[in-house]
Amino acid sequence: MKQLVAIFLMGFLTVEALGQQSVDVGVFGGTGTYFGDMTKIDFQKSTNPAYGGFIRFNFNPRYGLRFNVVNGTIGAEGKFEANPWTFNKNVLDISLNFEFNFMKYIVGDKATPWSTYISGGVGVQSYKYTMDSVRLALLVDPTYFVHAENSGSVMAATIPFGLGVKYNLSKRLGIGLEGSLRKSFSDKLDDLNDPLSHVNPEDIPIKYADQLHNNDWTAYIGIHLVYKMIYGNQEWEMKTPRKNMLDWGIWNKSRKQ
């Protein structure tokens, strides 16, 4: 928990350094699950609680930059090929996301009560990888262990993206529903690190997965609550007629109507 708070505060300082026009802070609660090398997954037993927080710097009512932290248990029960396989571990997910609102949206502004949105960016995941040779011996080629990597901590790059909807509750509070995916650049999340790899009769290592090509994904869905910390730019007051709310720019007091 202390590590999570420290990272969150670092993100706040980073956002503050960008300027003080409009800043939101939020908390997230929901569930997380996994997609990867396992061929059959019991999703009813493979979803676990996830929680986190974010700080969002709003460039204008359409565009924002969000520093996001999510922590929780990622695990699954199912099979790899025809053999049972399970894993369960804590995953810390940190990302920087660009957020685009399909309609103009400012937390607390009556003229912009809600909007759908999409997001995407870059991130990292931190977790522990366990190379269990006893369990793997039942699943992999005997030569797999010639080049198998040892257990240890993993810091893997990710590409996060998602979509959602957000809605105003009051002058400073908002609520949202969001679903997101993370593409991992590591194949170790499920403790099945390139399980089909082997050494052929010519003593040449044959690999099927690497950082760019692997099957590991994480997925999150949940609700977030947002507090408008800094209102900032008052020129963002929505003067655009309702019929023009889907245009691609922003309207401020300096423009003629």
Image: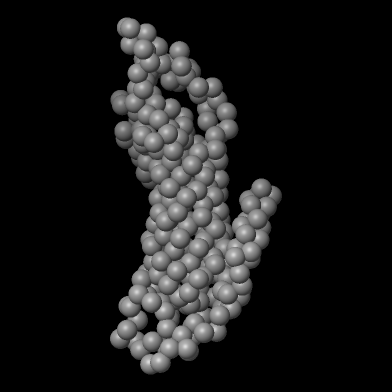
Color encoding of the figure: one colour
Number of dots carrying numbers? 0
Query: Height in image: 208 above or below 11?
Result: above
Which one is nearer the viewer's eye here, 66 or 226?
A: 66
Asked where in the image residue 113 lies, by quadrant, the reply is: bottom left
**Is residue 213 left or right of 108 when viewed as pictured?**
left
Residue at horizontal 38%, vertical 45%?
A: 44
Query: Height in image: 220 above or below 204?
Result: below
Which one is nearer the viewer's eye here, 72 or 155?
A: 155
Residue at horizontal 55%, vertical 40%?
A: 126
Which one is nearer the viewer's eye here, 142 or 56?
A: 56
Asked whether residue 257 appears in the rendered view, the answer is: yes
| Residue 161, horizontal then vertical, whole percent | 40, 54
Residue at horizontal 52%, vertical 27%?
A: 130
Residue at horizontal 35%, vertical 81%?
A: 245
**Is residue 11 left or right of 204 when viewed as pictured?**
right
The C terminus is located in which quarter? bottom left
| Residue 166, horizontal then vertical, whole percent | 43, 70
Asked whether residue 47 appears in the rendered view, the answer is: no
**Is residue 8 left or right of 195 when viewed as pictured?**
right
Query: Height in image: 173 above or below 243?
Result: above
